[in-house]
Image (tube, grey):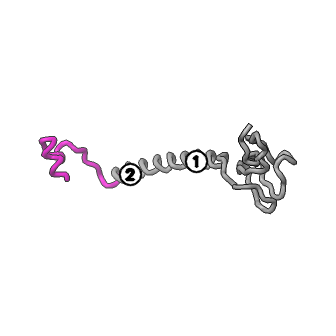
Amino acid sequence: MVGCVRKMIGHNMAETAPQYTLHEALSVALSVAQRALTAVAGLERRIAALEATALRDADVWKPEKDFKANDLTTYRGGLWRAKAPNTNVRPGTSNAWRLMHKTEDGGRGDHRR
């Protein structure tokens, strides 16, 4: 591969490439690695923040189910979002839930008017 590159640029790369001591090369590699780790840590924080607020489909509401904040469930024709973790709290009976959408037919599946 190096030979191909040398032919493409038309000269000996060793003549123009900077020469580094092992200590200098390791120092540069360590600096690059530290910057990469810092960047990755920042991205991990952003991903965690986004995932903490992501909406999740929790299927149909059941009293025995444990719901986490931002879980979405359906109950009596409504789409509900859990505002707080809860179990056995019926949507619409407390501040733990927020109604996101209600069907016109009350969930009966009859969409005719």
Magenta residues?
A: 1-23
Residue at (80, 55) in percent of width and height:
86
Residue at (62, 45) in percent of width and height:
50
Residue at (49, 50) in percent of width and height:
37
Position of 54 compared to 98: left or right?
left
- Residue 90 on image: x %, y %: 84, 53
User: Which amino acid type is marked by label 2?
Assistant: Ala
- Residue 111 on image: x %, y %: 71, 42
- Per the model, the C-alpha gap separating discs 1 and 2 is 27 Å
Q: Quadrant of the C terminus?
A: top right
Say which of 26 and 40 sits in front: 40
Indicate which label's residue lies in the foreground, 1 or 2. Answer: 1
Pointer 1 with pointer 2, Cβ within 8 A: no
User: Element type at marker 2?
Assistant: helix
- Residue 79 on image: x %, y %: 73, 46
Query: Which quadrant of the view contains residue 58?
Result: bottom right
Whether 52 is among the magenta residues is no
Q: Name the N-terminal-most of marks 1 and 2.
A: 2
User: Which amino acid type is marked by label 1?
Assistant: Ile
The residue under label 1 is 47
Residue most extreme to the right: 93
The residue under label 2 is 29
Vertically, is 37 above or below 113? below
Mark 2 neighbour density, 10 Å: few (under 14) some (14–19) many (20 or more): few
- Residue 61 on image: x %, y %: 76, 55
